[in-house]
Amino acid sequence: MRFIQVTLTLALTMGLFGCTNLKEVQDFAGQSAKLSGYTELTTRFRDTYYREQPYLSCEADRIAQENDARRKAAYKDLLTVHQSVTVYMQTLATLAGDDSFDLSPGIDSLSSGIKTHPDLGIDKAQVDAISGLAKVISKWATSSYQQRAVRNFIQEGNEPLQTTLAGMERLIDYYQKTNDNEWKTIKGLLEVELLFTDQPESKLLATLARAHTQDKAAEYQLASKKYTEAKKGVQTIAKGHQLLVDNLDKLSKQEIKDSLRQFSKDVRAINNHIESM
């Protein structure tokens, strides 16, 4: 009788809460945790002086060394900004995963204590059925708990996450501005030097200088593209998480799942694009 009462209670709970598949939430969070480019670009920012030093005058070199010290002092903190977003998204992916609130191991331990009693009508099929029923009950009973945990996590995390992502955007903009200024300095010096290598006896030197200029131009253009893609990735994550916050009670709706799936696809495409550069 007691078992029947518990079963009916759980059935009522299932009817009230339903079972929301959080796979789309898990996939979005998992892809967001893999955001590419930021660490590489932060390291490039730190190493600015190493690249620009050969092209600097004595006075410019003194100022550049001071900037270099500041960049290196901030490097660890700049990486932590990204790491905090990564850990948050990894945690969300774990919370939304199928195994986060899975009680199957505990249920298995219960069913393993049940033996077959053919003379009483309890055969292997009955033992397996009891284990299967227990797993179904545990899945549905914990579903509502998982949904609440995920909702609360997203709701409480959104404001600090959005602020952190906005900070990452500003940092990427600053990295890109530094990259552009660095290239202007190098390009300016190379162009001036080329003016003095226009004599026949300097033909080889001029050719090497032009080739070097082309190589440097390609390097800085590639970096600029990575800044653009990394910023796009941060913006996509921010929009995707805001979608979650705005639809916490509608995560089972097909249109929300479709939107999340698209955000996951977009983040994956951005990651792949950056890694292929």
Image (tube, helix red, strand yellow):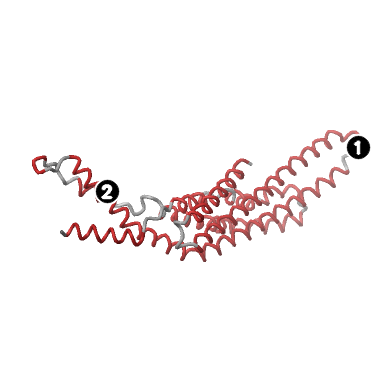
State the SS at label 1: loop
Quadrant occupied by the N terminus: bottom left
- Identified at 63% across, 56% down, the residue is 172
Task: Kindly give the residue lying farthest to the right in the view shown.
Answer: 199
Contact, mark 2 vs mark 1 (Cβ under 8 Å): no
Give residue 197's position: percent from left, percent from top: 87, 40
**Alpha carbon of mark 2 to alpha carbon of mark 1: how far?**
82 Å
Q: Say left or right for 126 vs 48.
A: left
Looking at the image, residue 153 lies above or below residue 28: below
Q: In this view of the protein, which residue sits in the foreground, 103 or 15?
A: 15
Q: In this view of the protein, which residue sits in the foreground, 7 or 221?
A: 7
For marks 2 and 1 on the same chain, the one whose residue lies earlier in the sequence: 2
- Residue 199 disc label: 1
Tag in front: 2 or 1: 2
Task: Kindly give the residue lying farthest to the left in the view shown.
Answer: 119
Give residue 126's position: percent from left, percent from top: 19, 43
Q: Say left or right for 262 vs 178.
A: left
Q: Say left or right for 103 vs 32.
A: left
Q: Residues within 10 Å of mark 1 (few under 14, many from 20)?
A: few
Q: In this view of the protein, which residue sits in the foreground, 135 or 121?
A: 121
Give residue 185's position: percent from left, percent from top: 77, 52
Q: Amino acid at mark 2?
A: Pro
Q: Amino acid at mark 1?
A: Gln
- Residue 100 disc label: none
Q: Residues within 10 Å of mark 2 (few under 14, many from 20)?
A: few
Return the residue at label 2. 105
Looking at the image, residue 66 lies above or below residue 53: below
State the SS at label 2: helix
Q: Say left or right for 254 vs 143.
A: right
Give residue 162's position: percent from left, percent from top: 55, 63
Quarter location, residue 74: bottom right
Q: In this view of the protein, which residue sits in the foreground, 272 or 77?
A: 272
